[in-house]
Image (cartoon, helix red, strand yellow):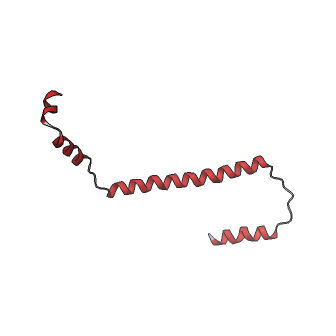
Amino acid sequence: MFFKLYFVLFLLLLSTNIFAYIDPGSGNIILQVILGGVGGIILFWKIIWDKIKSLFKKNDDNADSEISKKEEPEDKKKCG
């Protein structure tokens, strides 16, 4: 792994001047790719983190519905 990195760095240091032009449109595309990748990574980890948190979260939905049934007056149950 590090050998490849050092090899690429070595080649970059030995390279001569390259007269290349990157127009603003190409720069915008590169910026969009970088920002989209960062946004995708953040969204991916947020979804994974929410799923992990939901595994350890206590599910109180059933308890809330039972409490609301008990609090309802008897008159409303007979009418509806």
Residue for point 23% across, 46% down: 62
Q: In the rendered view of the protein, which quadrant contains the N terminus?
A: bottom right
Answer left or right for 58 relative to 3.
left
For residue 75, above or below residue 44: above
Could you say where residue 64 lies in the image, as x and y percent from the top left? 24, 47
Answer left or right for 27 relative to 67.
right
Q: How many marks?
A: 0
Q: Quadrant of residue 48?
A: bottom left
Residue for point 87% across, 58% down: 19
In this view of the protein, which residue sits in the foreground, 6 or 29? 29
Answer left or right for 34 relative to 78.
right
Q: Quadrant of residue 50?
A: bottom left
Could you say where residue 73 lies in the image, as x and y percent from the top left? 15, 37
Residue for point 78% across, 49% down: 24
In this view of the protein, which residue sits in the foreground, 66 or 58? 66
Answer left or right for 69 relative to 15.
left
Residue for point 43% across, 57% down: 49
Return the residue found at the far top.
Answer: 79
Q: In the rendered view of the protein, which quadrant contains the C terminus?
A: top left
In this view of the protein, which residue sits in the foreground, 61 or 14? 61
Q: Quadrant of residue 12?
A: bottom right
